[in-house]
Amino acid sequence: MDDLITCENLVKIYSSTASRDHKGIEVVALQGLDLTVAQGEMIGIVGESGSGKSSLLNILGGLDRPSAGKVLVAGSNLLEMSEEELNTYRLQQVGFVWQQTTRNLTPYLSALENVEMPIRINRTAEDQCRQRAVQLLEMTGLGDRLHHLPGQLSGGEQQRTAIAVALANQPNLILADEPTGELDTANSIKIYEILRKINRELGATIIIVSHDPGISQYVDRVVLIRDGKTSTETVRITPGIEAHDLLAYTSADYEELLMLDNSGRVQIPSEMLERMNIGGRVRVEVKAEGILLKPVEGHARSALSGERLSLEQSIYMEEEPLEEAVKVSLAQRFINLLQSRKK
Ligand SMILES: Nc1ncnc2c1ncn2[C@@H]1O[C@H](COP(=O)(O)OP(=O)(O)OP(=O)(O)O)[C@@H](O)[C@H]1O
Ligand SMILES: [Mg+2]
């Protein structure tokens, strides 16, 4: 599959001026993020609040420009586009669905008129415009709600209308920022199923930012963003668990992989470093099965809360079947993340 999106070393810094001393405050939202998304892929993005998920989506959607780095979508470098080119890109190549139902729809237009509006802006002939809008609303299950105003639709119906609006100009890329954030589980599942259908039938590439544990059932992979960088990637290795049956997930259903950036850096989860008592330096050995990182005397992990291991203990633990331990512990982290989100 060809890549639709390539982000390399993406940096986003927000600057604002503090009111009292007029000193600039800078927030580094993305700190050298790398991400590749293939044409036709559907991925989930998860991460703590403030980790940079929306910042990334805004950049991919051409709503905001990165401070540095490279972002290619379908071969075009978004950083080099003029304002006018970016406007065309937003109108023709991307569809958005936001968390707040009110942000997606114009309140005084019917569902049909909401979908028609972006098609009209693209100067499509009147009859085609109506026909296409009806088709899209039928596709999202709203064929019998065409003339309802957003206020007369349920939250789930509003989000499904928003998906139809996002699809209006046949975009190649759909970006959804917590589209189910205001919905219950049943309605969230409907949204994921519709997005999956759009992905399969129309071939659109879809990126969904989510706090919803059910997401992993519907996407090809889940990427975790941590401190403004892509950190790990999780793929489901066993099919068939019902999305709403969270208790059915076990770590054996997922494989979580650490992502390497272009310079070969990986972010090793702190639990692992703590477990092995690895601090500021690490000894690297190349083995037949892979690369082994070992603690170094004098560079133990500095005091953190919780129990720490001595160097002897960590070396002893290394003699356990390490490969299995690491695999389970990575996948377990993902499960823990999902379950903590559920609460
Ligand atoms: N317009 C802005 N001006 C200044 N700082 C901002 C702006 N937008 C985001 N930030 C900061 O950038 C960081 C990343 O924000 P972002 O909205 O990308 O996080 P997020 O992962 O989407 O979080 P959430 O899950 O809460 O939506 C945060 O520290 C946030 O406060
Ligand atoms: Mg956000």
Image (spheres, helix red, strand yellow):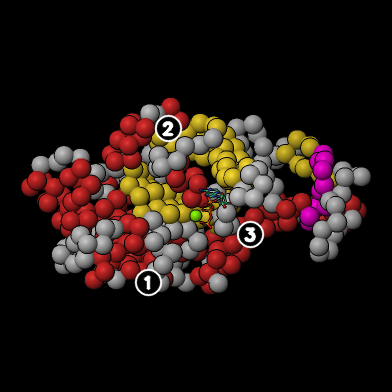
Residue 221 bears which disc, if any? none
* Label 1 crowd bin: few (<14), some (14–19), many (20+), radius 10 Å: few
* Local secondary structure at mark 3: helix
**Does label 2 or label 3 sit earlier along the sequence?**
2
What residue lies at 82% left-to-right and 55% top-to-bottom? 317
Residue drawn at (53%, 55%) of the image: 46
Quote the CA–CA distance across marks 2 and 3.
Answer: 34 Å
Label 2 or label 1, whichever comes before in sequence order: 2
Residue type at the position of mark 3: Arg
- Are the two marked residues, 1 and 3, in contact with CB atoms closer than 8 angstroms? no
In this view, the residue in front, 303 or 100, is: 100
Residue 277 visible here: yes
Please tell me whether residue 46 is drawn above or below residue 8 in the rendered image: below
Residue lying furthest front: 20
Q: Is residue 200 above or below residue 332?
A: above
Name the residue beneath numbered marker 3. Answer: 333
Res. 320 visible in picture:
no
Q: Which residues are magenta?
A: 274-283
The image position of residue 191, as x and y in percent, is 34, 62
How dense is the environment of label 3, judged by Cα within 10 Å: few (below 14), some, or many (20 and up)? Answer: some
Q: Which of pointers 1 and 3 indicates the residue nearer the eye?
A: 1
- The residue to which callout 1 is attached is 186
Q: Which quarter of the figure has residue 119?
A: top left
Coordinates of residue 118 in the picture (x, y in percent): 23, 47
- Asked whether disc 2 touches disc 1, contact meaning CB atoms under 8 Å apart, the reply is no
Residue under label 2 = 78
